[in-house]
Image (cartoon, grey):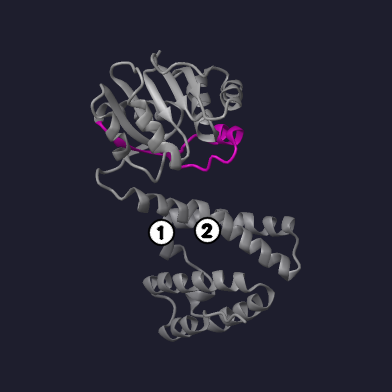
Amino acid sequence: MKRLAVIGPGKVGRTLARLFHVAGVFEIGALLARKDETPGDAAAFIGAGEPGGSLAHADIILIAVPDPVMETVIAGLAGERLKSGVIIAHTSGALGPELFAPLARKDVHTGCAHPVKAFSDPERSVATYAGTMTTLQGDAPARSELAKAFQAIGGQTLDLPDGIDRTLYHAAIVFMANHLPALVQAGLETFAHAGISRADGLAITGPILHDTLEAVLEKGPAAALTGPVARGDAATVARHLEKLNAADPDLAVLYAALARATADLSAEKGEASAEGLLAIGEMTQPEHD
């Protein structure tokens, strides 16, 4: 069995290592981190691993550190004694294979393996990992080995084209995944201003969020669109903005920005009247004192 070392066994690193360990994909070796206590905690969570161990015997090195230190960590590997042909991969979404340039003279294979998942809690991430998409870039041996490993723990993999803009790729994911909780929070705050409790707000929201997401994935965003903007109902939008401005101007600004984006999408759908869309465009400009 090939041996995996993890540099940065935080939420992402320890989740993946535990999945690989439980599935018998890799033997877990060195667990290295900036904080002395983290590798021990990670080993306990994973059920295997050597806190502070050596990279010299690793067949796979997974780097799951925060983006600001990723370049430094990879550059540091240039001075390490590594196994011939070792595969080195990082899990960053925003950073690409160019970070491996310092390792060009070493006998290694390199790649990017970005699991497109919210790793907010390792226990939950392990339980809900099945079906997660991991996007891959890098040289062929690295991509092949990584694809087999991630598929073996129940995930999906997708090779990304060379030369994509990783920053925009990552921004797209942030739009859809990281901003969704913020939108739900905005809705809950608006419920609170209306006099509805958080628990009741979540009970109301859950079914429609599931239904909307299923419709978007099945039919596409434009075809799944409903609501006052899609209907060209400028009067309702105006009332929303008036009340939101009085309750919380920041919520009104967010609503206005989303209404304008929704109006553009609605125009693509072709249902809202031109007059209605024009009126909405004029009204979605909240005023601040």
Question: Of 49 and 215, which appears nearest the observer?
Answer: 49
In which quadrant is the N terminus drawn?
top left
Residue at 49%, 34% in the rendered image = 130
Residue annotated with mark 2? 212
Q: CA distance from mark 2 to mark 1?
A: 10 Å
The residue labelled by disc 1 is: 220
Is residue 268 among what the camera can see? yes
Q: Nearer the viewer, residue 24 or 213?
A: 24
Q: Which sits earlier in the primary sequence, circle 2 or circle 1?
A: 2
Q: Which mark is residue 6?
A: none
Which quadrant of the figure has residue 161? top left
Q: Residue at x 62, y 63 (%)?
A: 186
**Label 2 Cα crowd, 10 Å radius (few <14 / some 14-19 / many 20+):** some
Q: Is residue 39 above or below residue 284?
A: above
Left or right placement of residue 58 versus residue 280 in this view: left
Q: Position of residue 194 (x, y in %)?
A: 72, 70
Say whether residue 133 is magenta.
yes
Q: Nearer the viewer, residue 47 or 194?
A: 47
- Is there a contact, CB below 8 Å, between mark 2 and mark 1? no
Q: Which residues are magenta?
A: 114-139
Query: Quarter holding the C terminus?
Result: bottom right
Q: Is residue 133 left or right of residue 241?
A: left
Of residues 123 and 167, the one drawn nearer to the viewer in this rendering = 167
Q: Residue at x 52, y 43 (%)?
A: 118
Q: Amino acid at mark 1?
A: Gly
Across and down, in percent, residue 218 comes to 43, 54
Residue 190 highlighted magenta (yes or no): no
- Res. 116 image quadrant: top left
